[in-house]
Image: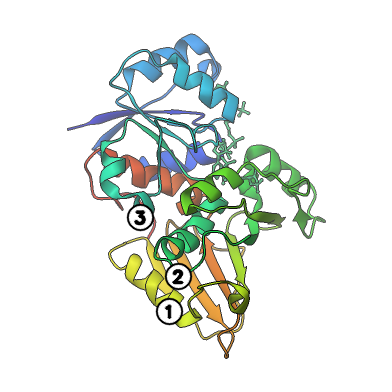
Amino acid sequence: MTRTVFIDGAVGTTGLEIAERLAGRPEFHLITLPEARRKDDAARAEALNAADFVILCLPDDAARAAVAMIANDTTRVIDASTAHRVAPGWTYGFPEVVGREAIAAAARVANPGCYPTGFIGLLAPLVRAGLLPADWPYTVNAVSGYSGGGKALIERFEADPDIAFRDYGLALGHKHIGEMQRLCGLAHPPVFAPAVIPAHRGMVVEIPLPLAAMPGAAGPDALRDALASFYADSPLVRVVADPADELLLRRSASPWDGLELRVFGAADGTQARLIAVLDNLGKGASGAAVQNLNLMAGLPETSGLHG
Ligand SMILES: NC(=O)C1=CN([C@@H]2O[C@H](COP(=O)(O)OP(=O)(O)OC[C@H]3O[C@@H](n4cnc5c(N)ncnc54)[C@H](OP(=O)(O)O)[C@@H]3O)[C@@H](O)[C@H]2O)C=CC1
Ligand SMILES: CC(=O)N[C@@H](CCC(=O)OP(=O)(O)O)C(=O)O
């Protein structure tokens, strides 16, 4: 059975990577628009209503407008933007955390943000298990490759190779905080410190934990063991017991759809650093969208993905 798929925003950064993961797969037929009509609302409305599956790779406002153009109850949607991550009626597209069955049955799936994939992947299972408190004021530090900001940030970094580091989100209230708080069930929004590095892709998301000061917190080994058992059946999420004292991102890294989680602990167990490594365009965006599409279409979740 061939399912039709329309990627709205197909020539953008995430859209291109989704098409690349679907290329050569007979289970899917891509509906495409010619360059001259890709922003033409009549052409988009026709494609949006003709497809079995629509994947929105658009800015938030355009994503909301695209959903409003769907006038049938058969087209199923995966939205890569931030527009619907905490919206009623939408299923959050993190299969390992919300359940594969929920994604498989959903008509509207909000693909997670890249940073939240690391944060939620680390914290949600531990808070849910009662090993870390829900009412702690968490902080999260992260770096992203510049493709995380789409075409505009890619252009900026490639035009100015002198940028060594870009700290941002300095006004606080980054758009990812809502989904981080909601999916982890936290009493307080986390303090989020994102930054961009001069590499095309790749991401590190870190949650520092002063365990000794946190009521009811388990020790580093128990946290690592709990994550390992939570993700034991996941083909994409891997918990790494890493004795190294450094962690490198390489500019030459190939596209990759996995998520690696590490727990580093002080020898006396009083502090820990939870660290997630992923590809912002892989499990952080396009890989996750294809994983969700596979599940919604009743196919093996890793088909077409980069191991
Ligand atoms: N890049 C990443 O790592 C991640 C991105 N996301 C989210 O995914 C979405 C897409 O991001 P990304 O691909 O990086 O962004 P890009 O800017 O690279 O691509 C967006 C595409 O959408 C097109 N577009 C804009 N408005 C319209 C419209 N009204 N109709 C049709 N097409 C339109 C743009 O056209 P034009 O080419 O003419 O500008 C562009 O091709 C965003 O919401 C982003 O926040 C989520 C997770 C990670
Ligand atoms: C480096 C960079 O700019 N990253 C983007 C987030 C990318 C992402 O996860 O996309 P959503 O915006 O759809 O959630 C940002 O911080 O706005």
Q: Which mark is residue 222?
A: 1
User: Mark 1, residues whose alpha carbon is within 10 Å: few (<14), some, or many (≥20)?
Assistant: some
Determine whether 151 is above or below 305 in the image. above
Asked if residue 94 can be seen in this view, the reply is: yes
Residue 285 percent across, percent down from the top left: 49, 46
Q: Nearer the viewer, residue 26 or 72?
A: 72
Residue at the location (59% across, 24% down)? Answer: 61
Residue at the location (39% across, 68% down)? Answer: 238
Q: Looking at the picture, which amino acid does disc 3 mark?
A: Glu
Residue 271 falls left or right of residue 239: right
User: Mark 2, residues whose alpha carbon is within 10 Å: few (<14), some, or many (≥20)?
Assistant: some
Q: Which mark is residue 90?
A: none
Per the image, label 3 sits on a secondary structure element best described as helix
Q: Quadrant of the C terminus?
A: bottom left
Residue underneath mark 2 = 131
Question: What separation in Å lies between label 2 and label 3 (alpha carbons)?
Answer: 18 Å
Per the image, label 1 sits on a secondary structure element best described as helix
Residue 281 percent across, percent down from the top left: 52, 49
Residue 103 falls left or right of residue 243: left
Determine whether 127 is above or below 212 in the image. above
Residue underneath mark 3 = 96
Q: Nearer the viewer, residue 45 or 224?
A: 224
